[in-house]
Image (cartoon, rainbow, N blue to C red):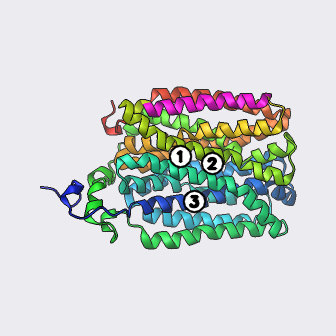
Amino acid sequence: MTTAAEPRPALEYEQEPTRTRYWVVVFAIVLAVVQYIDRVCISQAAPNISASLHLDKEQMGVVFSAFTLAYALFEIPTGYLGDVIGPRRVLTRVVLWWSLFTALTGAAWNWLALVVTRFLFGAGEAGCFPNLTKSFNRWLPAAERSRAQGIMWMSARWGGALTPLLVYYCLQFLHNNWRLAFVLFGLLGIVWVIAFRSWYRDDPRQHPAVNAAEAALLPSDAETLALHGQLPWARLYSSLTIWSLCVQYFAASYCWYFFITWFPTYLLEVRRFNLKDSALLAGLPLAFGGFGSVFAGWLAPVIARASGNVGGTRKGFGALGFLAAAILLVVSTKLHNAYAAVVAIALVSFFNDVTLPGAWTACMDVGGRYCGTVSGTMNMMGNLGGFVSPIVIGYVVKHTGNWHLTFYITAAVYVAGAVFWLLMDPVTPLEQQT
């Protein structure tokens, strides 16, 4: 006998399935954009902040990394919390938290206050993507998850891509008052919480707009509900696949954090663009990254169906994406034309983000009912890469003056990431892996 928690074939129902589940993707898209605006805005405002608070590059590198350290440390706790109490409660709390500390960034009076504020801001943002992934796991059939991840990450990157120009015009309108700009950005998350809290349900079958035919398409509770206190921690941290997911995401984030921290400064100091042009070009890598995400999110399922090899397709996109990114990063250092170099760096971001839908969908397939914890673990390690990256870049540039040396280091990190893509099993559930 079929229970209420188990999906039944849609053909048992006379009605057509509703499409309420796609609103979960819409909420995820909007939150991803808000999250990236709040995260990226500091890179474009960095020259104003540095001048106002008298900070050098090494100090700003620590400010950038304070956010990323907290973001990494709180990934597993918030991912696990989403598995246990559900994404609705967790997302409500963390979005309100990070919106508060986005606004309070504008109140920083010295370097230490800025570091502490950005650390607390990062602690809030840590809950975002593991819990959005958990909501996808509950609301979307398996066949729709990769494309949903691709669309969400495309939107996140494009939100970040527009942020430098948004901040530039915001600062112009506010007469370079960076403090007030952060207060305005902090209001965005509050609006999202009000709408999300009133609409979202952790159990899609409890949503009044989901009919029986749509409910039949969705995963069962047995597939998606975590068993409290029974997460297989030993298996999680002894799994080669989990470690491989973590290392490849470390590599992806190590480079990507350059785009949202030091890239505007690189454009000004190395490629000699003016402030307005650098604000426009600073968003180009994130724009290209968005194309990479949606490209992989749509193409990978097609190739997987044609080849009958989902795991091989994911591994291929991951390894080839990283190798292409490494090559282009080295090529960019040899280009004398500033615009050609920017395009090459933007293509690095494209191939970096080709790996994202496969990585996050692997977290859902491998993690199963514990996908919030698995995705939080992967994102934690990724953001440790993001924590290290701005400090290394700031240190190398300060002591050698050689920006391109940092590119060679990053290319080597990419090659290591490609190797670990080839070592994992990105489809077999953790509980079934040997």
- In terms of secondary structure, where does tag 2 sit? helix
Of badges 1 and 2, the one in the foreground is: 1
Label 3 Cα neighbours within 10 Å, binned few <14 / some 14-19 / many ≥20: many
Q: Position of residue 422 (x, y in %)?
A: 48, 26
Q: Is residue 339 visible?
A: yes
Question: Which residue is at the front of the view, 342 or 112?
Answer: 342
- In terms of secondary structure, where does tag 3 sit? helix
Q: Is the Cβ of the residue at disc 1 closer than 8 Å to that at disc 3?
A: no
The residue at 54%/34% (across/down) is: 247
Q: Is the Cβ of the residue at disc 3 closer than 8 Å to that at disc 2?
A: no
In the displayed structure, would residue 409 be above or below residue 261?
above
Q: Earlier in the sequence, mark 1 or mark 2?
A: 2
Q: Which mark is residue 69?
A: 2
The boundaries of the magenta stretch are 313-334
Q: CA distance from mark 1 to mark 2?
A: 28 Å
- In terms of secondary structure, where does tag 1 sit? helix
Type of amino acid at the residue the image marks with label 2: Leu
Quarter of the image with the C terminus is: top left
Q: CA distance from mark 3 to mark 2?
A: 12 Å
Residue of label 1: 294
